[in-house]
C-alpha cells in the first residue's frame, strides 16, 4: 500500500507540474505578448517617424484600444476569449487593430507573436489557419518596409512569397503546438487513469486485508470446532466407555458380594481397578493432546521418545525407537503434527493391533522429515476401515487430515495377519524461517 500511495502521489505531482507549466506558457503567450508587442512598437516608432508627428494621432489611440481589447478578452482568469463566440471576436479585433498600426509603423510587426498565439488558441478547427494566413500577410508587409516601400509588381510578388513562407512556418509551429498539446492532454488523461487505478488498487488491498483477517478468524474458529469435536470423540470412545465398564464391574461385584462369592467379587473389583487405570491414562492423554507440553521442554525426538516410553510401560508392548539424520527444530505446526501422529498411531496399536513389538523411526532428510510406525499385529484392510478397528476415534482419516493441513504426506501398508506400517512425512522447514517471515 505504501508503494501504491507513493506512485499515486508521484503521478499527481507530474500532472500538477504539467498543468502549471502549461498555464504559465498560456499566460505569457496569450496575456502578455500583446502588451510586449505594443511596447516594442511604441518604443521604436520614433526612430522611423521623427518628422511625422501625425503618426502619433493614429498610433496612440489604436494602441490604447488594442491594449483595452486584449485586457478585456485575455486579461481575466480564465480568459474570456476561450468562449466559443468570444474567441473569433477577439482574434478578428486583434488583427483589425494590428493592420493599421503596422501601416503607421512597421515596427508594430512584433505583435505577430500575439496574433499567431491568439489564432492558434482561440479559433476553432481550420479557422485557425485562416487566422494565421491573415496574420502572416500583415507581418509580411512589415518585412518589405510597410508604407515606406515603393509599390511595384516585384514588391507584390515578394510580399506574396513572404506570405506563403510565413504561413507555412507559422502553420508548422501551430501544428506542432497542437500536437504537443494533444500529447499533454493524453498524458494527463493517462495520469488520471493511473490515479484511479491506484485508488482502486489501494481499495482492493484494503478489502483483501479485511478478507484475510476474516479468513484467519474463520480458520481459527474452524480449528477450535474441530479440536472440540475430536476431544468429544476421544472422551466418548475412551473415558466414557471406561467409566461405563467400571460401573458395570462394580455392579457385578455387588451382586457377587450378595451371593457370598468372594473370588468372583475380587475378580470384578480387579477388573474395575484396571479399567479405572486405563481410563485415567486415556484422560491424561486427552488432556495432553490439547497442548504438547513436551515439545516446549524438549526437541521432537526426545518428546516422542518420552511419550513412546510411557506408552510402552502402560501397554506392555516392546517398542524400539530410532532417529536418523541430523535433527533440526521445525516449525511448531510441523512438530505438533508429527507428535500427534506418533501418539495416535501408538494408541491405535495398543487398542486394536494385538501386537507384541512396535518399531518407531524418525528420519531427518534434506527436504522432509518422515515418521514410520510399524507393528507385528493382526493387521487390517485399509480400504475397508477408517481406522484399525473401523471405529469412530481419531483414526487414520483424521491423522491424514492433520498432515494435509501442514502440506504433509500419508501412507499406510497393512493386510490381515501381516501387521501395519504407517508413514507420515512433512516438509523440513526450519523453525527460524517462521521468525524471519
Image: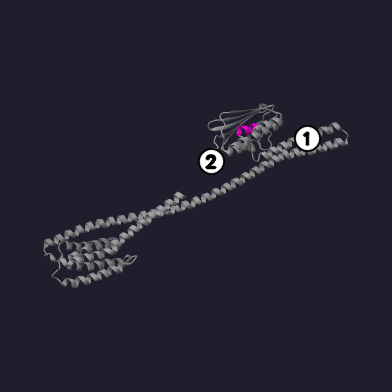
Give residue 273's mark.
Answer: 1
Image coordinates of residue 123 in percent, x first then y, are 29, 63
**Residue behind mark 2:** 435
Residue 34 drawn in magenta? no
**Mark 2 surroundings within 10 Å by alpha-carbon count, few (fewer than 14), some (14 through 19), many (20 or more):** few
Residue 301 drawn in magenta? yes
Image coordinates of residue 335 in percent, x first then y, are 59, 36
- The part of the chain drawn in magenta is 299-305
The secondary element bearing badge 1 is classed as helix
The secondary element bearing badge 2 is classed as helix
Nearer the observer, 186 or 426? 426
Q: Earlier in the sequence, mark 1 or mark 2?
A: 1
The residue depicted at 37 percent of the width and 54 percent of the height is: 14
Image coordinates of residue 177 in percent, x first then y, are 29, 56
Determine whether 321 is above or below 136 in the image: above
Count of numbered marks: 2
Nearer the observer, 62 or 419? 62
Distance of mark 1 from mark 2, alpha carbons? 48 Å
Image coordinates of residue 144 in percent, x first then y, are 15, 62
Residue 89 in view in this figure: no
Amino acid at each position: 500500500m505504501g508503494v501504491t500511495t507513493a506512485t499515486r502521489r508521484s503521478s499527481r505531482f507530474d500532472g500538477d507540474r504539467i498543468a502549471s507549466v502549461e498555464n504559465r506558457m498560456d499566460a505569457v503567450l496569450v496575456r502578455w505578448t500583446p502588451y510586449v508587442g505594443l511596447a516594442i512598437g511604441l518604443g521604436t516608432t520614433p526612430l522611423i517617424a521623427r518628422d511625422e508627428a501625425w503618426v502619433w494621432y493614429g498610433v496612440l489611440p489604436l494602441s490604447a484600444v488594442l491594449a483595452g481589447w486584449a485586457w478585456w478578452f485575455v486579461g481575466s482568469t480564465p480568459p474570456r476569449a476561450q468562449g466559443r463566440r468570444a474567441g473569433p471576436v477577439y482574434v478578428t479585433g486583434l488583427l483589425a487593430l494590428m493592420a493599421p498600426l503596422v501601416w503607421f509603423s512597421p515596427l508594430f510587426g512584433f505583435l505577430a507573436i500575439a496574433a499567431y498565439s491568439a489564432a492558434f488558441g482561440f479559433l476553432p478547427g481550420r479557422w485557425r489557419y485562416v487566422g494565421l494566413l491573415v496574420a502572416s500577410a500583415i507581418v509580411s508587409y512589415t518585412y518589405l518596409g510597410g508604407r515606406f516601400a515603393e509599390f511595384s509588381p516585384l514588391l507584390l510578388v515578394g510580399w506574396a512569397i513572404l506570405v506563403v513562407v510565413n504561413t507555412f512556418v507559422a502553420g508548422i509551429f501551430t501544428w506542432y503546438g497542437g500536437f504537443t498539446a494533444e500529447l499533454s492532454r493524453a498524458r494527463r488523461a493517462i495520469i488520471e487513469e493511473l490515479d484511479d487505478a491506484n485508488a482502486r488498487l489501494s481499495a482492493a488491498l484494503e478489502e483483501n486485508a479485511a478478507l484475510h483477517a476474516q479468513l484467519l478468524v474463520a480458520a481459527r474458529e474452524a480449528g477450535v470446532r474441530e479440536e472440540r469435536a475430536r476431544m468429544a470423540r476421544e472422551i466418548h470412545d475412551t473415558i466414557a466407555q471406561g467409566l461405563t465398564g467400571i460401573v458395570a464391574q462394580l455392579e457385578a461385584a455387588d451382586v457377587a458380594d450378595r451371593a457370598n462369592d468372594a473370588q468372583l467379587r475380587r475378580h470384578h473389583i480387579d477388573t474395575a481397578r484396571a479399567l479405572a487405570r486405563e481410563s485415567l491414562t486415556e484422560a491424561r492423554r486427552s488432556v495432553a493432546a490439547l497442548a504438547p507440553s513436551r515439545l516446549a521442554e524438549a526437541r521432537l525426538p526426545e518428546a516422542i521418545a518420552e511419550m513412546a516410553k510411557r506408552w510402552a510401560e502402560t501397554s506392555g508392548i516392546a517398542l524400539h525407537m530410532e532417529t536418523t539424520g541430523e535433527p533440526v527444530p521445525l516449525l511448531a505446526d510441523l512438530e505438533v503434527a508429527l507428535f500427534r501422529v506418533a501418539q495416535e498411531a501408538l494408541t491405535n496399536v495398543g487398542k486394536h493391533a494385538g501386537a507384541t513389538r512396535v518399531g518407531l523411526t524418525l528420519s531427518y532428510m534434506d527436504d522432509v522429515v518422515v515418521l514410520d510406525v510399524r507393528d507385528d499385529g493382526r493387521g487390517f484392510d485399509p480400504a475397508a476401515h477408517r481406522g484399525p478397528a473401523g471405529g469412530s476415534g481419531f483414526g487414520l482419516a483424521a491423522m491424514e487430515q492433520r498432515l494435509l493441513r501442514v502440506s504433509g504426506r500419508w501412507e499406510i501398508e497393512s493386510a490381515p495377519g501381516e501387521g501395519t506400517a504407517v508413514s507420515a512425512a512433512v516438509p523440513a522447514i526450519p523453525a527460524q524461517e517462521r521468525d524471519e517471515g
